[in-house]
Image (cartoon, rainbow, N blue to C red):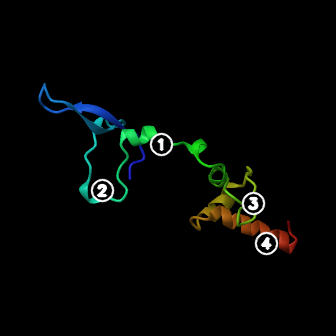
Amino acid sequence: MRWFSLKLIQAYESSVFAKPISVRYDVMNKRPVKPIPTLIDTENPEWTQDMVDRATGIDGLPASLQKKLRHRGPQRAPTKVATTVRFDADVVDHFKSGGPGWQTRINDALKKAIEVGIA
């Protein structure tokens, strides 16, 4: 999957008198992009420049649909607060040595400390 800009440009066949043709162009690498036949989805074709020009933004949708698309809805888990905390290096090393999820493990250890009454 491509995460960079592709642009539709005018290119010309090899003859000087040939008519222009549309070519997808990789802006970042400055070269034409060749389609990969096995990845072509016939039920959902790639958009042409005309389709892009005719596309409607979110403001052109019905108000009820705009409301659903603009707002996430309630969180399933309790909301957490983003904050900055400074720990000793050995404390962070201890929790990081357990692999991914070290911040969650610190949070759980602090919750236990509160439950036990030592914090």
Residue 28 falls in image quadrant: top left
Marks 3 and 4 in Cβ contact (< 8 Å): no
Badge 3 amino acid: Thr
**Residue 112 circle label:** 4
Residue at x 45%, y 40% (from the top left corner)? 54
Q: Is residue 6 visible?
A: no
* Spatial separation of the CA atoms under disc 2 and disc 3: 42 Å
Question: Which residue lies under the disc numbered 1?
Answer: 55
Residue denoted by label 2: 40
Q: Amino acid at mark 1?
A: Ala
- The Cα–Cα distance between marks 3 and 4, rounded to whole angstroms, is 19 Å
Instruction: Give the Cα distance between marks 4 and 2.
Output: 53 Å
The residue sitting at 88% across, 71% down in the picture is: 117
Q: Are marks 1 and 2 in contact (CB under 8 Å)?
A: no
Dot 2 or dot 3: first in sequence order is 2
Q: Nearer the viewer, mark 2 or mark 3?
A: 2
Q: Secondary structure at mark 4?
A: helix
Question: Do we see residue 83 in this rendering?
Answer: yes
Checking the image for residue 79, the label placed there is 3
What residue is at 44 percent from the left and 37 percent from the top?
Answer: 53
Residue 64 disc label? none
